[in-house]
Amino acid sequence: MPPKKRHSGTSQSKEPKPGAESVSADKKDSPELSVKKHRDKDAAFVALCKSLRVTDPVCDRAWTLWKAVQESMDDVTDSQKRLWGACLFVSVIDMDVSCFTLTQVLKAVSLDVTQFMSVVRKLDVNLDTISTKVTSALTRLEKKYEVMLALYQRFEKMCKNIFVLTSDGKERETLRTCWTMFLLAKGRALQMEDDLVISFQLLLCTLELFIKRCSPELLQPLYKSAISKVQSPPTRISRRNQSKAKPRAPDPEVDVQLLETLCKENECNAEEVKNVYHTSFTAFLDSMDLSRSWDFPQVNVADQQYEEHYLKSRDIDGRLFFDGDETVFAPKVQISQVERTPKKNPSDEEGSLVPPQTPIRAAMTSIQMLRGDLTSTGDQPSTTLATYFKQCTVDPTQDVRKRLEAHGQAFSQRFGQAVGPHCVVYGRERFSLGVRKYYQVMEAMLKSEEKRLSVQNFSKLLNDSTFHTSLLACALEVVMAAYGVSSFKNGGYNPGGGEAADRDVCFPWILDVFDLAAFDFYKVIESFIKADPTLSKNIIKHLETCENLIMERIAWRTGSPLFELLKQEHEGGAAEQVETPASFSQPLQHNHTAADLYLSPMHPGVRASPPESPATPATPATPSSQASFQASSQASSQASSQAASLTPRLPKSNSLSLFYKKLYRLAYTRLKTLCSYLLSPHPELEPIIWTLFQHTLQHEYELMRDRHLDQLMMSAMYAICKVKSVDLRFKTIVTSYKNMSNTSQETFKHVLITDGHYDSIIVFYNQVFMQKLKTNILQYASTRPPTLSPIPQIPRSPYKFPNSPLRVPGSNNVYISPMKSPRMSPGIMTPRSRMLVSIGESFGQSNRFERINQMVNSSERSFKRTLDLGSTPKPLKRLRFDVDGQDEADGSKSGGDSTLIQKLAEMSSTRSRMQEQKMKEDAESKKDEL
């Protein structure tokens, strides 16, 4: 049995520094390995331990882990030394001791980062070898490595455009010092070193520092001219006249023109970079005594200080990127995968070269799009929105302002705590963008509601604090996603807890900042997406994933209003079921908006009001929302007029009904995926498993409290296979489950059993799931099993992507898409290989319209090649399908052959129908004989 997760007594309050270069005063805290104590172990393993300077307890634990893995593995494909290194890595993380860095173990076992991570995960043969603590550490290291690799690739590319390569390699030392200084600045400025955007902005600041100190002959003309106009004043300050230097600004002199040039060349917002310079980078320069110095930082000083930082962090030595070390560089094939966009446009297009879509470029483009969408939106309500506020029975203007002030302070403080010192100002910047998006979407929502309901008094909705907080949180989540700091690695879990949790700003971090219930946040997501057509496909997918995480797990936490609503639905007689199975086969269509979901039904405790009370909507249908927007007298009169026809039953919750509709479809989608992995030979089991799964969600919803949707799914699958005598083990289930998207091993390794006690999913099944549903499960083994639940109709996505190009019906090669903002050049759009027209923008020469007409009207596909200004036509290599379903493998389709092809197709179709009819008749005759 692999060792249980525990804390070793060897862990000290002061971390011993690993490596040969740091063994000195810490020797007492980290005693050397005693070879005599480990004679029972492989000598090569002990030698590896000694080279990595691990302690005796770490050596013992790693060896025990290795023996357990060795027994579990059917075939050891990797060398023993590599697996030993992985066992040592897992052991030091679980024991929370400091013996070696990741780079040191990589060099010891001759692996790069990606290969080593793969080997570590291979240890988890029985799915109980690697703890969630180790998984969290792996995820953090992978993210940090990806960010560092992306930054170095961009650094290398920028340096080629900035510096002149000399024959003696004089610039090489300068570039190395620059990279080391950046790594040190990033390490000191950011607690969360995987923040790609702020890290890149710090890189630009570091380059600015080195460029203006660099000899002009080492600079390319663009940057030589960028600093020439502002070089003279700083050179006077650099003289050794301290009395004249001190009266100047306390911050280091910033070459604004140079910084703006760097930002322009790299599509980065200049104001944001200036803020980073004056906060985080200035503080770093002060700590290095470089604020008023115009000399280059000493190489040995920067190197020594980064060495200390790297040994303390115990992970990757970033200097190895500059050295081209094999431990940090993945194979070239993997690196080139980021360049997915074709680099060449037709020669007569506006930009001849399209830059590759690297992680940094993607982040900069996302931020550029976000800011471009908010150019016409201010930090205050627009005139239209202010009018909506004034038309309310109770004007919400002051409450909105006070709420934003409180939330803004909370957000920026928490952001600074998570990201790093001096980062509170960045939190304010992000919050300011979020407020502008909040106002923009709120105005669009209200306009839509006014058009739908023909009312202008939205007093109830606009005085609902939960609605405002949810809308603001959604706007901020969009901003965070645009900046790339909110992601869903590890399935949305953060099992590390403690300090790691404080540095994690991924969703649902924003809910914790505002103390907002996930169920309340879910209500606004769909309306938010529909109200903002400028959202990119990636942002829409991000919000959709947020919604899925809420339905899977977050909304089922103890204290969620979801449980109170479910209790009222089941006990108050509002409805027999939150969602009838008969509706599963119907498409997921509804006309509920955020206003309906927030106002009907009211929050727990208010729903007990009598039907004639204005606090309760008259009916759950859309007209009730209209009544709730009117003045109180109008709502009272309408409720009174309908009181006689109302039954004692409470109105059904719109928000709960829609939640369960989406929950069932999500649940079945995931079940169907898992069944496709495991039960292809037994397709008859899928509807049976779904029936048990759906019954559990509907009638035994308490099993979801503080648990995950997939835990019930896997338990239902195992239960049905058990009663149907299908050999399917839990190990097999969870192994396939890991291959599904957005999953985490936390789901099956850390399941709530009783209050405060967690164990594996097998223990949950035996002690909780089976005990609760034993009678129901056994019914499926009887001769009269329960009626099967209908299969939900699964839409491709409940959200449309309006920015995706659509093919014009009846044409092979004409696509249209909504007009982009003027800030986006057509060169950024796809497809690259076709002529692109943006109506309303300058198109160029008139003869290009003629070419488009020729391309559209021509029946010869090869004519498209004439657009290449006389280039030789080339045959199409890919199959292309025309409107009628015919394929063109060679790019040609002569008019004379088209009639013959059509006749042949008709003959083939007739023959197929005759064969099918004959087979049916033969089958019916055999039935009659039986």
Image (cartoon, grey):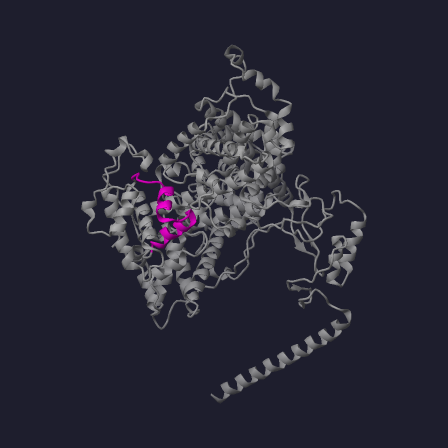
Residue 104 falls within the magenta-colored stretch: yes
Residue 266 falls within the magenta-colored stretch: no
Observer-nearest of 61 and 289: 289
Tell me where the magenta segment starts and ends, as one range: 97-124
In the rendered image, the vertical position of residue 864 relative to residue 249, given as above or below: below
| Quarter containing the N terminus | bottom left
Does residue 479 appear anywhere in the picture? yes
Indicate left or right for 631 with 882 as reference. Answer: left
In the rendered image, the vertical position of residue 721 relative to residue 149, given as above or below: below
Observer-nearest of 830 and 767: 830
| Residue 782, position as x, y percentages in the image | 34, 71
| Residue 553, position as x, y percentages in the image | 41, 48
| Residue 891, position as x, y percentages in the image | 70, 64
Observer-nearest of 778 and 6: 6
Residue at the image point whose x is 76% and y is 52% from the top: 869
| Residue 134, position as x, y percentages in the image | 34, 46
Does residue 636 appear anywhere in the picture? no
Residue at the image point whose x is 50% and y is 87% from the top: 926
In the rendered image, the vertical position of residue 756 relative to residue 414, given as above or below: below
Residue at the image point whose x is 72% and y is 76% from the top: 903
Q: Could you tell me what secondary structure mostly forms the magenta stretch?
A: helix
Observer-nearest of 356 and 109: 109
> To which quarter of the image does residue 498 belong?
top left
